[in-house]
Amino acid sequence: MSVNEMMNEISEMALISKFAKILPRSPYSVNQTHTSDSEILDVGLDTNYLAVTTDIISEEITEGLYSDPHFMGWMAMVVNLSDIAAVGAKPIGMLLSMTVSPDWDKDFIEKIIQGMAEACHVHECGSIGGDYNTGVPALGATALGLVDKNSVMKRIGMNPGDLVYLTGPAGLGNAFVAIKLLFPDLLDKYPFKPMARIKEATIISKYATSCMDTSDGFIFTVDSLFRLNSVAINIDAIDSICHPAVMMMAEFGTPPLTFLSGIHGEFELCFTIPPEKEDAFLNEMHSNHFSPVKAGTVYPEINSRKGVFINKKLFPSTEARNLWENSTSASEYSMNLLKLSSDFLTS
Amino acid sequence: MSVNEMMNEISEMALISKFAKILPRSPYSVNQTHTSDSEILDVGLDTNYLAVTTDIISEEITEGLYSDPHFMGWMAMVVNLSDIAAVGAKPIGMLLSMTVSPDWDKDFIEKIIQGMAEACHVHECGSIGGDYNTGVPALGATALGLVDKNSVMKRIGMNPGDLVYLTGPAGLGNAFVAIKLLFPDLLDKYPFKPMARIKEATIISKYATSCMDTSDGFIFTVDSLFRLNSVAINIDAIDSICHPAVMMMAEFGTPPLTFLSGIHGEFELCFTIPPEKEDAFLNEMHSNHFSPVKAGTVYPEINSRKGVFINKKLFPSTEARNLWENSTSASEYSMNLLKLSSDFLTS
């Protein structure tokens, strides 16, 4: 299969590729469709490109997964800042996009703004304005950033032999969903409040051959990376990359792989490091008190196949990615996901 | 009243001012809250600022006002391009933000994209990527533009004596709503497909002391301008600035003023020209085949009051602007609007 054919197995990627053919492309655009977490523009600066990305959270709010207003505001910023981090950029401004429910009172809305403000402070960026509407809730932003032309990280570029790393353990995003719905008392012990990995990315961009954030979950990310780079990616040891919250949930009988395969991500960066640069990379990360997690290795093929492999066994990541779209409810999706990972582990 | 007090009479402006105090402001931001249609950033370019704006259309779709998919896509671009035009910028890229209904089939969605593509072609800009979701429909974009640092147009800056101009006749946006709902057979004769006034703005920005687009209707725009500039703005002759569709609807008994006061705008630019520059401005516009419409004059005060005046009589524009928010349905809003304009004309 060609890269395009592999991408078209994922219905959303196929749709976006189709759109991209209809729409004229801006001549200021530097990146190709699908190839980076933020769009990259050459606006005429000497050393920097402009990075731009937009994302909203809506279903997470309407389905009750995000119910705390401060957290909603925080997440509306972080989902965008994470994409800015994934290209190695530093944020320069957040253009807010808010559709608030007519049922929310002023106090609730103010708490959302306070969550946004906290995210701006923590990630050292500011608001530049925004758009405000009333309707079905949707909170988001367009994030703008600047990135040195020589250190832009893209999803493409990895080579066989490169090592797959994460900025932190995986699976917390999906574990949060399970804990929130099943064991809300445990949320204090296993809180979910992801940071965008802006600071880590300034180091990572010096070494990495590719990068993508895990905003849609770890397996989703690795699946995109194998398709775009036309390689096989092997994940060596599931348990060693999982967040403690995942291992806690595993004690209730759900295999950790389930939490890596779901689409509610943890907003870590997933990136590849050439083996000869690994020592220098780890030294610089550790001396800055960052703890990257080694997750796997890139191969040209494994058993003559490209794809996502777990302990050298081909994982049905296409099926896992399309599962949400093919499920009629969140609970059906959860059951299908559990079945898919259990079947894989026992087959 | 201070400028702030006048702005706080408008509940949405008051809310946004409150948010702006909570959120840290980006140091790259050049403009103040409320003062321009697009946000203006100094990203380090020698002669240009970056202009950025974001807007979505949602209620227009869910309420059935926009039902043709090509038109939806067109409008999702134009609402943003119009804000780029209003600061005198040229668009350099559109970052799409699409939430499509699960009820729309692929053909319908493709027509939306084709409408977006046509708007990009006509306005000489291109897509840089975007975000795609399924849910309650919301189509929009973030538009990016570049504007010469010396010719940025803001909402503030007008002086007493300046003349208020429009790029074209007013009221078509609201007339379209009435025609679409009441006389759909007449849509062919009075079509609504606004252009963003990008080309006009490159001329206007050489002369104008302020500019704002009429995306929320003519009176709404003039109301914002009087508050921000702390002046009185007199509209001389309603009929002479109205679009033919408005005059046609007037024959059915609805005063033209009603169509100027509603909040579905026509996306003209409303701007002020110093009287000594009027001749040169008109010459350049006419020689480029543009036909600006003179709408009124700026005064320090009229009868010791600031506000929107029609033939020197104070119009209740605060009430008109807050009417939508204070109505429980679109039909109640229409009736309230009709009553407000009729009462004004007969009082």
Image (tube, coloured by chain):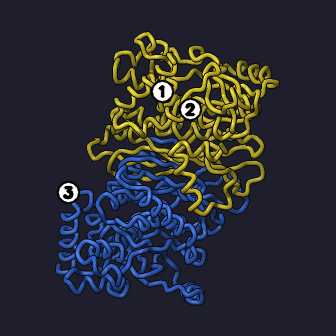
Chain colours: A yellow, B blue
Q: Which residue is mark 1?
A: A173
**Circles 1 and 3 on the same subunit:** no
Q: Tell whether B154 sits left or right of A136.
A: right
Badge 2 sits on which subunit? A
Q: Which residue is mark 2?
A: A214
**Residue type at numbered disc 1:** Gly
Badge 3 sits on which subunit? B
* Image disc number at residue A202: none
Quadrant position of the N terminus of chain A in the picture: top right
Q: What residue sits 27% from the left and 76% below the top?
A: B184
Neighbourhood count class around disc 3 (C-alpha, 10 Å): few under 14, some 14–19, many 20 upward: few
Residue B189, quarter of the rendered image: bottom left
**Residue type at numbered disc 3:** Thr
Q: SS of the residue at dot 2? A: loop
Q: What residue sits 22% from the left and 69% below the top?
A: B337
Q: Which residue is mark 3?
A: B328
Q: Tell whether B106 sits left or right of B246.
A: right
Tag count in the figure? 3
Tag 1 near tag 2, CB within 8 Å: yes
Q: SS of the residue at dot 1? A: helix
Neighbourhood count class around disc 1 (C-alpha, 10 Å): few under 14, some 14–19, many 20 upward: many
Q: What residue sits 34% from the left and 20% below the top?
A: A182
Q: Is residue B13 visible?
A: no
- Farthest-out residue, right: A276
